[in-house]
Structures are given as C-alpha cells and as structure tokens.
Amino acid sequence: MEVKNMALSEQRMRVYPYYGILALLALVGLVAIGVRLAEGMRVTALSSPMAWGMWVAFYIYFIGLSAGSFLLSTLIYVFGMHQYEKVGRMALLSALFALVAGMLFVWIDLGHPWRFWKVFTRWNYTSVLAWEVLAYLFYIATLGIELWALMRCDLAHLALTVSGWRGKLYRFLTFGFRCPESEAAYRRCHAQSMRVVRILGIIGIPVAIMVHGGTGAIFAVVAAKPYWYTGLFPIIFLVSALASGAALMTFLYAFFGRKDEEHLAITRGMANLMVLFLCIDLLLLTSEFLVGLYGKIPEHIRVYHAILFGPFSYTFWVGQLLVGALIPIALATLPRTRNNIFWLGLGGLSVVIGIVAVRLNLVVPAYVVPVLEGLEHAINQPRWAYTYFPSFWEWASSIGTIALVVLLFSLAFQFLPMFHEFPQRFQAASESR
Amino acid sequence: MSATALNRRTLLQRLAQFAALLFVGGGSAVRAKEPSQLDESSLPQLPPPQPDEDVLIRMMRELQRALKKPVHERRWVMVIDLRKCVGCHACTIACIAENKLPPGVVYRPVIEEEIGEYPHVTRRFLPRPCLHCDHPPCVPVCPVHATWKRPDGIVVIDYDACIGCRYCITACPYGARSFDWGEHYSDGTPRRAEYDQSPSPEYGRQWERKGTRSPIGNARKCHFCLHRIEKGMLPQCVTSCIGRATFFGDANDPDSLVSELIAKPNVMRLKEELGTEPRVYYLV
C-alpha cells in the first residue's frame, strides 16, 4: 500500500505540469472562442472565394480521427482480434472525444453559431451536411452506449471499492448498474456486456463509414470544384481516417499502454495496421494526382500545381508526405526501430500530426482557382482574396480547442477503467477453491 | 414584420409545425413564402406606348404586365449584350448603393478580359449577376432550407434562417455568393459613417447591420432586386446601365423584349456543360 501511494504521488508530480499547460492553452482557446462569438466571422482570415479554412480542416481531421479509431475498435469487438483487446477502450474513448472536437470546430465555423439547432427544425434532406449532422448524433449515441457497456462491470466494481469524489464519480457513471455478487453472475454479466458491445460495434460500422465517408461526400458532391468532384474523394477520407486512427492508437498504446510482456506486440500490431492504411492512402493519392494532372482541365491541374509548387507546398512535401507518411513508415518497418516501443510511438505521433496537413490539403487548395477566369481581378477587395493564411484568432481558438479536448480526454483516460480488471475478491475466491 | 410576442395561438402553431416537421421530415412547411399581393395603384405611372420609346420604358411596361399574372406564371430572365457593355461598372456600383452592400459583398462584378498583345489589343467586359439557375447547385446543399428557388425563378436567401455555413458559396460554380463578414467601410475611423448604417431594403425588409445580426454572418447574393420588381421597378443594374446593355423581363411573355433577345442565334450562357440552366443570357 505504501509503495503504491508513493508511486501515485510521483505520478502526480509528473502529470501536474502537463495538466497545467493544457489548462492554460484551453483557457486561451475559450477566450479566443469568446472573441470569435462576440465579434463574428470577421476575426478570421477567410474570404468569400476561400470560404472554408483551418477550422473546417480540423473539423474533418477530428471526424476522421474518430471514425478511424472507432473502426479500429471493431476489429476487436466485431471481428474477434482479441489480441488487441487492451487497445479497445482507448480507441472508443478517443473516438468519442475526437467527435466532440470535430463538432466544436464545425460549430465555431458557423456564421450564426446560435442557430445550429435549425439543422433539426429545418432539416433539408438534399443536403449532405444535414445528413451528416444526424449521422454524428447517431454515432455519438452508439459510441457512448458501447463505451459504457464495455466499462460498466469495472465501473460498478470501482463504485463499491473506491471512496471520495472518485467513488462518487464512478457511482454516478454506473447509472444505477450494480456489480453482481457472485463470480458466476459476474461472468454472465460480463459476457452479456460484451454481446451488447458486439452488436453496437456491428451497428457502428456502417454508421462510422457514413460519418466519415459522408464527410468526404460533403466535398465530393460539389461539381463546381473538380479537385473534390471524384468518386475516390470520400474513399480517401476513409482510408486516411483509418491511418490516423491506427496512428493514434500506436502512439497512445506505446506511451500510455499497459507495460507488460504484450506491450511491444500490441504496439507493433497497431503500427503495422497504420503502415498498411498509409500505403493504401498513398496509392489512392497517386491515382488522383496522375489522373488529375493528365487532363488539361485548368481548374484541376492548377489545384495540383498549387499543392505541389505553391506557397504552401511545404504542407504537402514536409507535412503530408514526410511527417505524415514516409518517416512513420520507415520507423515502423526498419529493423533498427520497429522493435523499439519508443520509436513506434513516435511514428504514430508523427502520423497524427501529419494528417493535419493532409486535411488542410484536402480543403484549402480547391479554392485557389477562381471559378470564372478574371473574377479575381473583377472584385478587388480583401474579402475576395484568393490567398489564405489563418488569423491569430483562428490559431488561438484551434490550439485552445484541441488543448481543451486533450485535457478532458486525459482526465477521462486517467480516471476511467481503461483496461478490464477481473475483481480481486473473485480472484481470491477462485484461488482458494 | 414586427417582432411577434409568443402568444398561445402562435405557440401552438409553432409546436404543430415542429411536430409536423419531425414526423414528415420535410421542409415544405417552411418553404412556401408567397410574395406579397400586388397593389396596382402603387405601380409607377408610364407614358402611353410609342414606337421608338426607350427600352427601359418598354421593359417597365412588360414588367407591370407580368406582375398582374400569378407568380408561378412569371419567368424572370436577364439578358446582357456584351457588344454594348463598355465596362463602366455603373451596374456594380448601383447595385452596391441599392442594396447597401458592405465591403466584401459584391453581387454584380464586371469581369474584364484583355485580348491580344499591344498594339493589337481589345477588351471584353462580362457583368456577372447571380444567374438564378433553373438547377441551382447552391440550393440543395443548404442544410437548413434557407435558400430556395421561387416559383418565378428567383433564387432567394432567408437571412433569418441561414446559419452561415458557407456550403452554398462553395457550391456555386459562378462565384455569385458572398459572405457578409461584418465589416464596414468606416472601420478603423473614429466614427461609423452614416452610409455604413443605412438599412438594406432586400426582400422588402429593412435590414440593419449591427453587431452580429443578420445579414451579417449570412451568405448574400443578387436577387434581381426582388424588392424593386415587386414595386414595378426594374433591377437597379438594368436601370443604371448607360449603354442599355442589360435587359430584364418575363420570358413567359412571348411579346417581351427578353423573349425576342434570347431567341437570337448569338446567345450564350456561362458553363452550360454543368447543367445548371442559368437564367442570365449573354449576347455575343
């Protein structure tokens, strides 16, 4: 007991500065969001022809991270890859918080944020965006119930054994669910929970595909933007979502996973999945680029030209290609690093960061070509500019929102039962038998 | 339209509408907004017809004729004769003055093209209002049914419904929609100028731009000066065109000037390959 307490306080010494920095950044973000709400959209650097910017890029980034993490969890709970069981709750918890982040980002991007509820009262069935909002809600409900069903036995056990505010929290989170008294009942109850988890996982698969494939379709249905208007576009969204989900799990499990004899094997498994999805992603990307560049349609090739050689081409070469794909693939495959948990985790983090560049390059370049030739000179005003670099408030609110969600996620990660524990009282009983 | 207090009857109506929406799942209840009834005595008085009268007078006469028909029988179109356009930008400016457009909101820019190399140079001008497409790409993408095509063909925006997601701006292949960023011409000066405070008369209302209130934070676009049409007046860009290069009228009226013009062989429309069926025709 003594030893355990010491370890806890030591841990506290380590995590306090981390929480402090996150809380500070989150506070800055809340102030920035407050300024944005009070001042309106003029605090952004957006213009009418470049209507969607960094907030939308982060919106699709987090929706992708969510769908990717969720689909990864179905490998375990639906497709029976139980060797990755210890990643399951992490994946679902990440999916839940990432979705909240995504919805926050699309919310602050609205010209009238307080009218968001009109999506429900004036719902327009021909709008992909309207369908997506419904999909997000259905998805978040599925996720939440699945996560609770997964944790309820552990929560009920903790509610009985832990006192103080944490005990109160666990008692609240059980929502009245009681821990079975006998071992047999406990096992039955646990099996029942896993069945519920499996069913929700099966329901969740098409929902998650609709959530992120559909988010891709928001862009893909816009015939006015040839760069988006391809059948491959929503698929690229999905594959890069799977890559980012696998990368997040690699990173989380490498640094915050259970450090036992399975640690390396699980981390490597996640890293291998990440490499697989990254390679498919690169294949699809190459196909899109080659087909697009082969034609001579100006709206098409000028967008690729901007991505490859424009003023922000570093987001492609460095962000998307190097940080988002090549470095992590190397770390996960080279003999020197692939058996080292630290390097694998770093590779995962590298993809998690690099996919931000992928998302930016999916949104912003489509806008650099004027829809009518000469329109860029016809309206000579800053809010009709064809260049975009996020404003201070866009940066501040983005970093702050991310910090806020990471902070909440970290707290949930620290206090929720992330791994299944067979209650000790039963263990003792079965040993003595 | 004043701010209505929520009495019991309206509350019940709203609840019923809400329930209907939930169960039917459509937006039909919020969609129909019939334009106001025509008051013939308020229409501008016109001189008796003459054989060589100004086309503006002729178009006004035809406009008044069309207004006497039910809305769905009118088919508003615009014709722009590029051979007559001299690139004076009077329409762009008149539109800004009429609709009290703030910085960054432009309904009718004039695109200038230079053809050839010095000294063999010629210039071409292309005014671009909203094209009021028969298959408008901006309408189906709106998540809240805040923009739709009226029975007479004008694509309108309900500023009170628009949530400002800018999907329609992205979807328009002609760049016809602007976002109202909430800026003023006198920003950065000690006092907000008077012209920055004049309310916009769009859609027959008085829209004051204050704080983050609509139309700030909304998508905005040309509406063929609907508020003027319904009072028997031509769109401001037509009235202000010094070369008489812009025409407006009812294409369902076979005797109208625009019907004559769009039957000519030298007529073209922008990006016809997209299937949007624009209602703005160019004579080239």
Image (cartoon, rainbow, N blue to C red):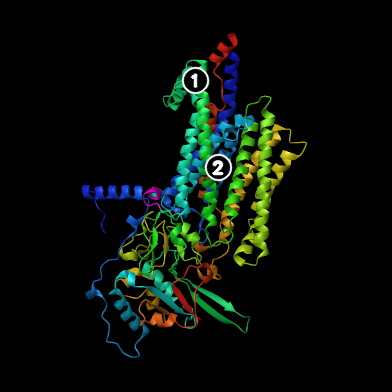
Helix, strand or loop at mark 1: helix
- Provide the residue span drawn in magenta: A116-123
Pointer 2 residue: A67
Q: What mark, if any, has residue A157 been given in the picture?
A: 1
Q: Pick whichever, B16 or B184, lies toward us.
A: B16
| Magenta highlight on residue A117 | yes
Q: Nearer the viewer, residue A333 or A331?
A: A333
Amino acid type, callout 2: Ala
Give the side of residue A306 with respect to residue B11, left or right. right
Mark 1–mark 2 CB contact (< 8 Å): no
Whether the magenta-drawn stretch holds residue A293 is answered as no
Q: Amino acid at mark 1?
A: His
Q: Earlier in the sequence, mark 1 or mark 2?
A: 2
Q: Quadrant of the N terminus of chain A?
A: top right
Residue at (65, 53) in percent of width and height: A285
Spatial separation of the CA atoms under disc 1 and disc 2: 30 Å
Using the image, determine if residue A377 lies above or below residue A221: below
On screen, residue A317 versus residue A241, left or right, reads: right
Q: Are marks 1 and 2 on the same chain?
A: yes
Give the image location of residue A40, x and y in percent.
43, 52
**Residue lying farthest top?**
A432
Is B185 left, or right, of B61 in this rendering? right
Q: Quadrant of residue B53?
A: bottom left
As drawn, A348 above or below B228 = above
Chain ID, mark 1: A
User: Is residue A407 at least partly visible in the picture?
Assistant: no
- Tell me the element at label 2: helix
Residue at the right extreme, as displayed: A335
